[in-house]
């Protein structure tokens, strides 16, 4: 009976809010959802994008207990990460507990509204994020309802192929190294030397930017990015070199630093 009622709600909502008609696979995952009309699949992230209004829906799976992550989504903790909590409620998703969280986050002079559907178990947590600029409501007044409805259609299919290499638009050669491919997440291939994430061992992340970024100065951009990647109080760029990979010019950079616990970190 619940299945029938849920199906009726979906059919009505699709008509009212302009959803697409069927579940669409999310690259590199075992999950599918019904994206709103105007949202297309993309290989720059695990999800869908609406380039016209700068909105996206993406799925991330983290190797952490669901309840632990949910307990960490407090007003104070989110403020520390540059986000303002708008609402947080426990809901039922596919007859299991889930949490729906709404926050505001400024980035590069733009206020983004983020809706997060969080669910999982003691071994992993799935985050389905719907993100859109606050100003996009003027262009698409029902964007919030469309994204919320889309998030709630998320389903799991154990038979769905989640091959990370099928999801990425690039490949790298790890022959002769100790790195092992772990997963595809947010447009990136993630490797570690022990095959585990999280890990204290070396990790390698290779990915596309989530949006088009104009680069006037590659070196300045690389230095800023590696400081953010280190996530340390102080960082020191050791070496910068120009490189060419697959006929594309780039920057090779090495930096180190210490975190709040005075633990040394090195990034390449």
Image (cartoon, helix red, strand yellow):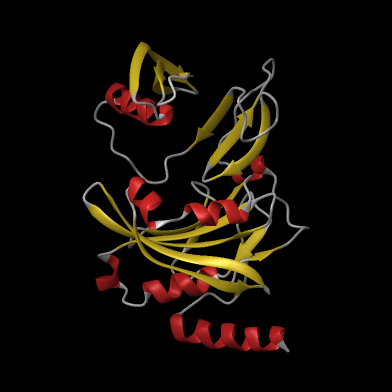
Task: Indicate the position of residue 229 as horizontal and vertical percent values.
Answer: 42, 30
**Residue 118 picture location, percent across and down:** 55, 60
Q: Would residue 56 be seen by someone viewing this image from the given angle?
A: yes
Q: Is residue 252 visible?
A: no
Viewer-side residue, 134 vs 249:
134
Residue 99 to residue 63: above or below? below
Residue at 29% x, 71% y: name it. Answer: 137
Q: Residue furthest left?
A: 109
Q: Nearer the viewer, residue 74 or 50?
A: 74
Residue 234, percent from left and from top: 33, 21
Q: In screen coordinates, is 155 left or right of 55?
A: right
The residue lying at 49 percent from left, 52 percent from top is 72
Image vertical order of residue 166 relative to residue 203, above or below: below
Up-down relation of residue 240 to residue 216 (above or below): above
Which residue is drawn at the image coordinates 25% and 72% (left, top)?
138
Which residue: 78% across, 58% down? 159
Instruction: Give the quadrant of the N terminus.
Output: bottom right
Q: Is residue 262 above or below residue 154?
A: above
The number of discs equals: 0
Residue 145, image x, y percentages: 42, 76
* Residue 99 occupies quadrant: bottom right
């Amino acid at each position: 009976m619940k299945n029938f009622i849920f199906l009726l709600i979906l059919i009505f909502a699709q008509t009212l809010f302009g959803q697409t008609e069927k579940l669409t696979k999310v690259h590199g995952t075992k999950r599918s959802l019904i994206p709103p009309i105007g949202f297309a699949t993309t290989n720059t992230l695990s999800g869908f994008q609406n380039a016209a209004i700068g909105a996206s829906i993406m799925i991330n799976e983290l190797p952490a207990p669901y309840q632990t992550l949910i307990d960490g989504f407090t007003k104070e903790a989110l403020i520390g990460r540059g986000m303002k909590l708008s609402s947080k409620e426990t809901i039922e998703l596919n007859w299991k507990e889930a949490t729906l969280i709404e926050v505001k986050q400024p980035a590069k002079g733009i206020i983004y509204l983020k809706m997060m559907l969080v669910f999982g178990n003691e071994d992993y947590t799935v985050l389905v994020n719907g993100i859109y600029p606050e100003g996009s409501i003027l262009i698409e007044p029902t964007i919030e309802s469309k994204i919320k409805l889309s998030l709630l259609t998320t389903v799991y299919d154990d038979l769905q192929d989640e091959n990370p290499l099928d999801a990425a638009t690039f490949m790298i050669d790890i022959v002769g190294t100790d790195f092992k491919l772990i997963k595809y997440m947010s447009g990136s291939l993630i490797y570690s030397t022990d095959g585990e994430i999280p890990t204290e061992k070396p990790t390698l992340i290779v990915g596309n930017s989530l949006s088009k970024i104009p680069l006037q100065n590659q070196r300045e951009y690389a230095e800023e990015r590696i400081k953010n990647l280190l996530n340390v109080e102080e960082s020191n760029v050791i070496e910068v070199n120009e490189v060419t990979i697959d006929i594309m010019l780039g920057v090779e950079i090495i930096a180190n630093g210490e975190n709040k616990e005075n633990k040394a970190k090195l990034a390449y």
